[in-house]
Amino acid sequence: AALTLLHVYQVPIYPLPDGVVVPTTLSVTDLLAEVERALVDWRGEAEQLGVRRVKAISVEGLPWREIVAQAAEGKFDLLVVGTHGHSGIKHLLLGSVAERVVRHAPCPVLAVRPLPAAAQVKQ
């Protein structure tokens, strides 16, 4: 099977009474460089595990919308998204990218929660 690794980033904008604050270009540039390094590492891990066709891309935008758009454009068979599993006030304040992807995706979605610390394999 082919694997597409997608990272969606949203440049933070902080609203203030007199306008908005956008991070400096340098910090956004540093962030994007880190994202690209991570995608290269993840792609390498997938290839070492035997995945023959791996594509790694990053896009800017509202995460759930970009994930759904990429899924529709790429005609994916399955989306796998990570979730923190927030509920209550955290869910209300932070929202849920995974929930919105599940609701709007054009294909099946597998939402995966992180392993508890005790179950994680040490490398």
Image: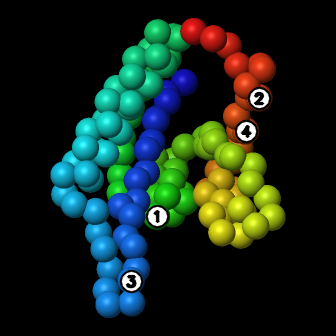
Of marks 2 and 3, which one's residue comes earlier in the chain?
Answer: 3
Displayed quadrant of residue 41: top left
Residue 59 sits above or below residue 20 on the image = above
Residue at 46% across, 35% down: 4
- Would residue 24 appear left or right of 8 to someone viewing this image? left
Which mark, residue 113? 4
Confirm whether residue 72 shows in the render. no
Kind of element beneath mark 3 = strand
- Identify residue type, mark 4: Arg
x and y percentages locating residue 30 in the rendered image: 25, 44
Q: Give the CA separation, mark 2 to mark 3.
A: 38 Å
In the picture of the structure, the residue carrying the numbered disc 2 is 116
Q: Are marks 4 and 2 in contact (CB under 8 Å)?
A: no
- Identify residue type, mark 2: Pro
In the picture of the structure, the residue carrying the numbered disc 3 is 16
Label 3 vs label 4, nearer the camera: 3
x and y percentages locating residue 74 in the rendered image: 46, 47
Label 4 vs label 2, nearer the camera: 2
Residue 21 sits above or below residue 6 on the image = below
Which mark, residue 89? none
Q: Are marks 2 and 3 in contact (CB under 8 Å)?
A: no
Q: Give the CA separation, mark 4 to mark 1.
A: 21 Å
- Identify residue type, mark 3: Leu
Label 2 vs label 3, nearer the camera: 3
x and y percentages locating residue 9 in the rendered image: 40, 53
Q: What crowding class fits label 2: few (fewer than 14 Cα within 10 Å), some (14-19), or many (20 or more)? A: few
